[in-house]
Image: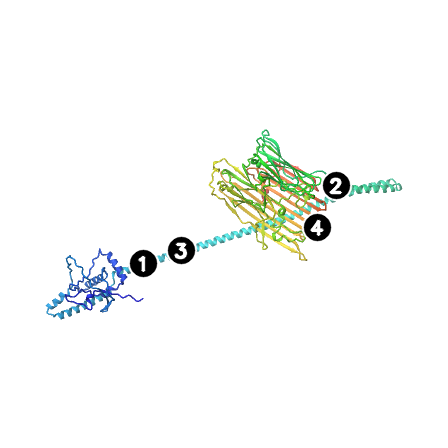
Amino acid sequence: MAPQKSVTEVPRSILPRLTWNGSSARTTVPTPQSNILSAKQQQKTLRIHSRNSAGRRLHTLTFSPHSSTSVSAVVGEPTLSSISRRLLESTSLSISRPAPIGNPIRYNGVYVAAFKPARRAFHASAPQQRDHHFDTLKFVQRLKEEGFSEEQAVAMMRVLNDVIQESIQNLTRTMVLREDTERSTYTQKVDFAKLRSELLNADSTEAQLTRSSHEKIAADLAKLNSRLRDEIGRTQASVRLDLNLEKGRIREEANSQEMRIKETETRIEQEVAGLRERVEAVKFSTLQWLMGVCTGTAALILGAWRLFIYVVTMLLRTVLGLLSLLAAPSKGTLEVFQVCQPVQYRGEDNTHCDQNVLLMEHVFASSYGHPFIGYYSPPKCEFDTVKINLTVTSQGRQFDRLALLFLGDTEVFRTSTAEPTADGIVWTYIKDMSQYNALWQTRQKLIFDLGNIINDLYTGPFGVTLTAYFSREGHVRTADVILPISNKKSASNSSSAFTVPGDNTKILYQLPPNISRAVVSISVCGQSTEEFWWSNVFSYDTETFNATIGELYGYSPFREVQLYVDDILAGIIWPFPIIFTGGVAPGFWRPIVGIDAFDLRQPEIDISPFLPILKDGQPHSFEIKIVGLSVSRNGTVTFSSRVGSYWVVTGNIFLYLSDSALDRTSSGTEKPYVDAHTPQFKATRSLVKNQAGGNDSLNYSVLVERTLSIRSSEFLWSQNLTYSNFGLFNQQGMSQSTNQHTAGRSTIIAFGANQTSNEVLFEYPLSVNQTYRPTDAGLSIHAQMSRGLDIKTTGATGISTYTLISGPSRLHTQQWGEAFYQPTDNSSISFGDTTDVFESSNILGHYKRSVRAVNGSIVSDTDDTDDQSPSLNDQSDHDSLLR
């Protein structure tokens, strides 16, 4: 854009030139430096002078068309400056100026604007008298008086005017307006302020960058520390897993050596017995022969011959008789039993209550889907102790069966049956059921579910008699409210157990506000493809030996039972590997059944840390899940979303109420802090093929470590568990070996003035070797087994469904043996040698028993009930459970 031209406003009356006579129109002397400002700058100058009008006197030239042109001038610099200032002010402060009539006109090198002639407004006020410092008319008249002619005077006036005009221009050319000075000063202040702001911003930016760098370095250091801790933790976990692996291998070798020693001892005993019989026979025959020789050679030859024939015949009969006795079990009903601590009857005051009540007497034949339905009414006496007596008889051929006892929708007892013989079996089991006292106090529907099949092949029904003994023994406190986690099908006369996978196990409850403690017990066991879950393989290995033994079962040999409260993980259970009386090889379990086969324990999870939210008066969900492991071919291990078919699952919520007013109110906003670290998994697998290209052996292992901690302001529940399993299939799947070890610790701490705690430690060792041989009627089984159960607890409120007793206790039980099974067309041949050692110490005293059974008969049985037992606080026992 071209620069804007400056113009000076001059009235039209002085154009085309200035006039100096008295009748001339008013004139405005142009000032070159007075019109430098643009239109916007003039407006700004106008505003500044308007604000300062009160303190500054403005001098303007008044131009009148009827008066003479007057210009005041005084020779000297101050006067000229005053004149130039007045000219500038007169130009910039013209508020009401006439509108220009056209484009600006150049005059004497300066652009001027032409205006319409101004018209004077007439009014009655007296004209103002102005003091003119320089009157050109008087100056001309004086020159004329001095003798100059008019032309000379005018010429001199013009020359003098030009000189004055040029002087003014020279003076004003180098002058600066005060407004410009103030503007420059303001601009400098703005620039300085901007510079100061930029310096401050730069300093702040540098400080922020430094701070950000420091924070980034600190964050990187924290990440490095966290990574270092994770690496150290993984290294420690790997070392622990390796140690557990070595321990498992050492334990496996020790068990194998022990089994070989026992097998050798058995064979030695059998060989010694045979040699003894042969020596006796030789002695007898020798004596007979010597007697014949003494009676005479001739006469005794015939007699000796007859005697020899007789002796041989008798010996053959004796040997055959002995062999038949050894090969066949004893006739009559076989009494089977579970080695356990006997339940004692000791009343505090039997005058209050001492009654036996028949609960059930029923024969279960074809009873799948048809449980026994009865009704129970409490006795009319004050009792606090309930003990049930279960007696079962059976005769014929039958598998082992699972049985569940319900009071309404609540499962209170889970058991299994023994496999009967042709001559019949019988067993009796007594159990303390006082922990369900809250249910026994009211009328209940009693459901006993024992599914059985009777046909041409399976001919053995089960006759069951169930009685209950009620007494008052001053028992410990039991739960005030018991709520079932079940299918709730008692109204339709059905079992209320969940089947997983398949059923939705989530259930809702609105709990009372005055709870002081809450415990959940869970009863689970695998059936069908999950009965021997501890011998399963990885899912992608299930078809490894299809050509020899068929499809294997998957989802790995690991199982975890999870409890969720409001979809928050509340606790976990690693189940005990229960083996029923038909498991592995039937010869193991006559007459001694497996550990806990007649009374399946219910592990417990203390959910007291959830009490603040459970007592808010709103419905809350409880859910039980069962998961296995999903192992990929690259070794990645995660929890599987499901398991095989199927598991029988129920749970119970035991609530202990308080009369304290503090326990009746709760904000319901405190959620427990759950610290559930990702489990440490380690899985290995190797497959070896034979020369023909077929699968010959499969070797796999699984190691798991898991910790869980749930804390509230009043309670802390923590769990620490380890697991290892080493499996081997060889001989194209015809031989299988499993070595498993499970150990854990569960702790509940109640904070407060009287802090209490309870700790439960457990250990489940298991070693099973099986070899299969094909026969015309099926597969024969030769098996070796060693298993155990160790529990130690410091004791807590109530009677535990896991330890089956109240207070501190210590339990150690172990079974080992060897068995053989071979099916035939119409029956089977079974041999077994089993030893069971049981030892417990609790508030009832010390109990120890060791039993050995061979081929269905007891060969040794020692029972020791003295009090020479190790202390329940023995640190060595404590450490052994933490291996």
Residue position marked by numbered label 3 in the rendering = 207
The disc, 1 or 4, on the residue closer to the chain's N-terminal end is 1
Which of the two marks, 2 or 3, is nearer to us in this view?
Answer: 2
Point out which mark residue 190 bears: 1
Above or below residue 124? Residue 317 is above
Residue positioned most to the top? 351
Residue pictured at 70% horizontal, 46% vertical: 821
Pinpoint residue 859: horizontal percent, then vertical percent.
70, 40
The disc, 1 or 3, on the residue closer to the chain's N-terminal end is 1
Q: Amino acid at mark 3?
A: Ala
The disc, 2 or 4, on the residue closer to the chain's N-terminal end is 2
Residue pictured at 51% horizontal, 42% vertical: 620
Dot 2 falls on a residue whose secondary structure is helix
Query: Is residue 189 something one can see in this rendering?
Result: yes
Mark 1 vs mark 3, CA separation in Å: 25 Å
Q: Is residue 211 left or right of residue 276?
A: left
Mark 2 vs mark 4, CA separation in Å: 28 Å
Point out which mark residue 325 bears: 2
Residue position marked by numbered label 4 in the rendering = 774
Residue positioned most to the front? 492
For mark 3, does the 10 Å Cα neighbourhood hold few (<14), some (14 to 19), or many (20 or more) residues?
A: few
Which of the two marks, 1 or 3, is nearer to us in this view?
Answer: 1
Discs 1, 2 touching: Cβ within 8 Å? no
Residue positioned most to the right? 298
Mark 1 vs mark 4, CA separation in Å: 105 Å
For the residue pair 200 and 726, the one nearer the viewer reads as: 726
For mark 1, does the 10 Å Cα neighbourhood hold few (<14), some (14 to 19), or many (20 or more) residues?
A: few
Pinpoint residue 594: horizontal percent, then vertical percent.
65, 42
Residue pictured at 66% horizontal, 50% vertical: 736
The disc, 2 or 3, on the residue closer to the chain's N-terminal end is 3
Pinpoint residue 669: horizontal percent, then vertical percent.
47, 43
